[in-house]
Amino acid sequence: MSTPTANKLSTEKIGKLIWEYSFPSIVGMVVMSVYNIVDRIFIGHGVGALAISGLALTFPFMILLQAFGMLIGAGAASRISINMGEGNTARAEKVLGNALTLTVIISGSVALLSFLMMDYLLKLFGGTDLTIGYAKDYMQIIIPGSIFSATLYGFNNIMRASGFPRKAMYTMMIGAAVNVILDPIFIFVFDWGIRGAAIATVISFIIGSWWVLTHFNLPVSHIKFRKENFRLEKDIVYSILNIGMSPFSMQLATSIVVILINSTLLKYGGDLAIGAFGIINSLITLIIMVVLGLNQGTQPIVGYNYGAKLYDRMFRTVKLAIIIGTILTTSGFLLGMFFSDFSVGLFTKDNELTQISANALRTSIFMFPFVGFQIVISNFFQSIGKARVSIFLSLTRQFIFLIPAILLLPSVFGLNGAWAAMPVSDALATITAAFTYYHFYKNFKRL
């Protein structure tokens, strides 16, 4: 069944479409990263430098929460875009209903296991006697709220892919606004410390997830929740997880790598080095989120035109996305290089932590101008259902090249080697993505 949104995706100017879909998505993703940044800023000034290190210990778990949200949300969003491009609304609604059931089952199971294994996980993440108490206070609140965060992240992707990019942006803005308002009240006024930051975050997740789920029961939505679609169907579940496995693998690999980085930093730089990583990771994630927002905006355009066999429009979309992604990461590189002291100073007034963090930021983003290209290409293969290729490209930057670099470079260059592992991985992953895309494009045009 043709809809105004579908007609637009196949006929509107590519540049206008990317702006219309990506701008709200970028705002939404930036706002999403504000959750972590706001917590770190208020905790750094309201609790102390070691509390930032304690909060950094929870980062692998926060990544894992987002991973399960992306496993379902990104996979369902891609399938829904393709189904809508094929005019199969009924199939898209089955994907929607199955996605909600999967979210509840998977995120609930992960939350239960994480709560039971909390002490073990925090030690695995690099916790010490000085920092593990802060991390435990935070995770005791965040873990029960993880079902709401998975719902928020996952179904916000689906809302955007089904033709409501601006409303998806509002979803994230509402949640972030609640977090920003409640954080200082709970930390400074009620004196709840790091637990107050966690409570504020969970409340924002609850409000955001309620907002996004009610959308799919409104008359304006192109696809709706229907009771008969909540029952899991094997082929639907497989189709969701098959595509969603790419961003999930990337996030899971990131979580594993963060654990490895934390243990390396603890060995070569101590607790404050872990805190520095928490700070620069917040800043780097902010830039990456902008590119991921671009990807989420282009995903329904690429997916729909691929499904509709409008391949010229598909490739033009990718080309423009590469240009924009490169501009975005280059801008992040320049800001990080020339304003590193100011950037890390937002999080802490501790001189030693500021010095370590500023040096780490400048080293870590050295290859950032090329990262935008790599991320866009990985997303392209996900958008057209080439899950295995997308998974491979996603893992090159966050896992395949990064882990050997982390294991080898610090033994030679010490703490600076740990920071240098990131740009080395970025460079190798970009070369791999360029080689892969070139051969795909060449063979696709020939066929």
Image: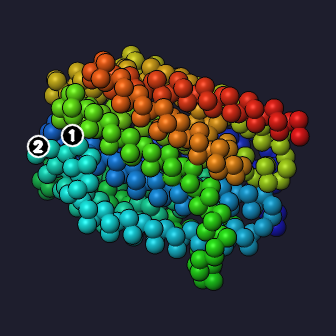
Observer-nearest of 198 and 118: 118
Query: Within the image, what quadrant is residue 224 found in?
Result: bottom right
Circle 1: residue type:
Ser
In the rendered image, the vertical position of residue 8 relative to residue 209, given as above or below: above
State the SS at label 2.
loop
Q: Are marks 2 and 1 in contact (CB under 8 Å)?
A: yes
Observer-nearest of 192 and 438: 438
First-in-chain label (2 vs 1): 1
How many residues crowd around disc 1 within 10 Å: few (fewer than 14), some, or many (20 or more)? many
How many residues crowd around disc 2 within 10 Å: few (fewer than 14), some, or many (20 or more)? few
In the rendered image, the vertical position of residue 102 relative to residue 130, given as above or below: below
Residue 203, x across and y down, in percent: 32, 62
Using the rendered image of the protein, determine whether residue 279 is visible from the camera's viewpoint: no
Query: Within the image, what quadrant is residue 217 found in?
Result: bottom right
Measure how far apart labels 2 and 1 are at the Cα level.
Answer: 9 Å
Does residue 429 appear to the left or right of 435 in the view shown?
left
Q: Residue at x 65, y 44 (%)?
A: 389
> Which residue position holds label 2?
130
Query: Within the image, what quadrant is residue 292 found in?
Result: top right
In the rendered image, the vertical position of residue 257 relative to residue 116, given as above or below: above
Q: Quadrant of the C terminus?
A: top right
- How many numbered discs? 2
> Which residue position holds label 1?
53
Using the rendered image of the protein, determine whether residue 56 is visible from the camera's viewpoint: yes
Residue 394, x across and y down, in percent: 55, 41
Please, which residue is most extreme toward the bottom here? Answer: 228
Residue 416 is labelled as none
Please, which residue is most extreme toward the right here? Answer: 447
Does residue 380 appear to the left or right of 179 in the view shown?
right
